[in-house]
Amino acid sequence: MQGAYAIGRTHEAGPWLGFQPTHAGYRFVVATETDVRSREADADLLLVLAIAYFEEALADPPQEVAATHADLSGMVRHVAALEQDPGRRLLLNEAVDAIDDGLGGDAVAARLNAARAGNADEQADPVDLLVELAEELLQD
């Protein structure tokens, strides 16, 4: 899929998960060897993707589509630019700074988790949520 970035796989030989920037925002992408599916991604889903990436919670993605820190920084910067709540926007901007400064994955994930707090699905484990969404998307 053109312009899509993978953050990891559900398991070693499983589908890869990621995102794709578009003119209208971002899409959540799931791909197998033979199929690529996507859907619109809201701010919470984008944060979940970023958290899973920085926690290194998934199996390694295919190198040819692997996301970089710059790709994730751009995605989180997009979420921050659209955030209406000043406190949450501040937390998101701190996460962007942490990514751009090259802080460790745990430090970045902690900032992203703090920004995510208050959302309906905040208690859901990011990896479990991503795997569930990927399975649903591949079944459609």
Image (tube, grey):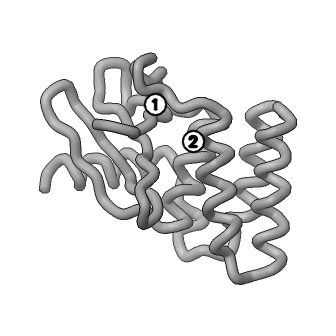
Residue at the (64%, 48%) spot, across then down:
74
The disc label shown at residue 52, or none:
2
- Whether pointer 1 and pointer 2 mark residues with C-beta atoms closer than 8 Å, the reply is yes
**Residue at position x 44%, y 33% in the image:** 6
Residue at 37%, 26% (x, y): give it. Answer: 11
Above or below residue 54? Residue 111 is below
Location of residue 52 in the rendering, given as x and y in whole percent from the top left corner? 57, 41
Q: Which mark is residue 8?
A: 1
- In the picture, measured across the screen, residue 140 lies left or right of residue 29, that is left
- Using the image as rendered, state which of residue 127 and residue 61 is in the foreground: 61
Query: Could you say where residue 117 lies in the image, as x and y percent from the top left?
Result: 70, 68
Screen quadrant of the N terminus: top left
Distance CA(mark 1)–CA(mark 2): 8 Å
User: What kind of residue is marked 1?
Assistant: Gly
Helix, strand or loop at label 2? It is: helix
User: Residue at position x 26%, y 36% from top?
Assistant: 31
Disc 1 packing (10 Å; few <14; some 14–19; many ≥20): many
How many numbered tags mark residues here? 2
Marked residue nearer the N-terminal end (1 or 2): 1
Instruction: Give the quarter of the image for residue 39.
Output: bottom left
Kind of element beneath mark 1 = strand
Q: Residues within 10 Å of mark 2 (few under 14, many from 20)?
A: many
Looking at the rendered structure, the kind of residue marked 2 is: Ala
Residue furthest front in the image: 23
The location of residue 123, given as percent across then percent down, is: 59, 64
Q: Position of residue 110 (x, y in %)?
A: 78, 49
Q: Quadrant of residue 100?
A: top right
Residue toward you, 91 or 3? 3
Locate the C terminus by quadrant: bottom left
Q: Is residue 28 above or below residue 71?
A: below
